[in-house]
Amino acid sequence: MDDFTRLEQKLAKLRQRERAPGEKRIIRGTPEKLLAGILAEVDEIILPRRVSFALANGPALQFAVANRRLQALLAPTPATEGAAQLADKALKDAEDPNLAALKVVILATLKSADALTITSRRQTDAGFPSDIGVPVQQLARAWNVTEAVDDEVTAEAMLEYFIAGLGDRVLAWLRIDGEEVADQGGDAALLGTIGEHAAVFLDGYFAKRDQLYQGETGPAALVLNADGDAPSLVFLDCGTALAFLAVPAELSAGVLVEWQARDTS
Amino acid sequence: MDVAEALDNLRAEVAGCDLAAFTDLSSKMVLCVSAGGRRAQEELDALSAIAATVLAGSVAEGAQSLLGEELPGSAMTMTNVDLRLFLRSPSSKNEALICVCAPTTDLATIMDRGKNALDQIVAAG
């Protein structure tokens, strides 16, 4: 990928995200995907930053990053074995002996994680020289992380991660890729209802889609709440990927909040 | 408190709320609006048509079997551009509140204040 292509992709992402620098984001996936996500994040950072990748239950991996290089794991570290020994030690280059140990620490920390909240801020101390650290491409090779080179998340994968992250807050769900049901889960009776009536809903929805979003072509969400006790319908539309979620009515706004905060990269 | 005052208060209370409107779903006409600047009639007509679609029209009817055979009492749409809330009046099924907000608007707040505004409008008769 040449620099112009990278810049165009970056600009496209910035337009899409419309987020302020330092605003928190969430990425989801398996530990290996999250490791790739960490590298993808590092790959976007030029100015010196202290970047935090926090797990849902509290501990966070914090790194010094600059010039698209991972410079060091910073203290305070998670309680993961071996983490404290690596804290604040600069990674000199791709041959640095601590590089392999750092991958082990990161994956051990992420062992039971399925999401990371990313925040970044300026480094408050002097930081490391800008030529210190391991460039992402070299890091990806050393750690055998192929996804870091291409950080594009497909609409299908984004929906898959999003639904997986909701856990048992979703009573039933059905995910459609293209024109096929890709996956489903949850309460069998609710799934049966969704399966039986999804086509009717889609008929009405697509007849009015342009009207609903008035030409906006990015990912969209529609939440419909009944007045009674029935579960709410959360319908997620990412173009080629769609999802029906049956959610307890009292949780539907919370699900939409998570949709607001999702990672769109 | 009249309708206009309730809508003005709603916008003042919720950061990121750009427009609040009270609409008639059957005629698809906005009855009262509070907005930062003057809005084109076409924009208000379009918003009212969307409210009718999601609360009473084809989208609502298509979802009815998925909502325990009820029509939606409230609906939200979210894109990268905005967040829209549609709340049907509890007393008059043909009237609804519309809010158009920034996508980062606090959802719990807009839901809560929107319901309050609708209650005030209904109470004012």
Image (spheres, coloured by chain):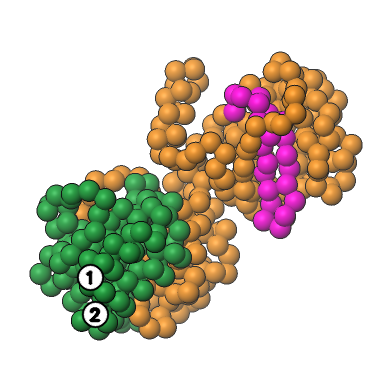
Chain colours: A orange, B green
The amino acid at mark 1 is: Val
Question: For the image shown, how many numbered marks are present on the structure?
Answer: 2
Q: Is residue A91 left or right of residue B32?
A: right
- Magenta-drawn stretch contains A55: yes
Count residues near mark 2 (Cα–Cα under 10 Å), then give few for <14, some for 14-19, many for 20+.
few
User: Which quadrant of the structure image shows residue B83?
Assistant: bottom left
Q: Are marks 1 and 2 in contact (CB under 8 Å)?
A: yes
User: B7 or A187, which is in the foreground?
Assistant: B7
Q: Whole-percent x and y of residue B19?
A: 27, 56
Q: Which residue is mark 2?
A: B124
Q: Which residue is mark 1?
A: B3
**Mark 1 → mark 2, Cα distance in angstroms:** 8 Å
Chain ID at mark 2: B
- Magenta-drawn stretch contains A105: no
Q: Residue at x 59, y 24 (%)?
A: A46
Q: Residue at x 44, y 40 (%)?
A: A17
User: Which quadrant of the structure image shows residue A143?
Assistant: top right
Magenta range: A45-66
Q: Whole-percent x and y of residue B97?
A: 26, 68
Q: Residue at x 78, y 36 (%)?
A: A74
Label 1: element kind: helix
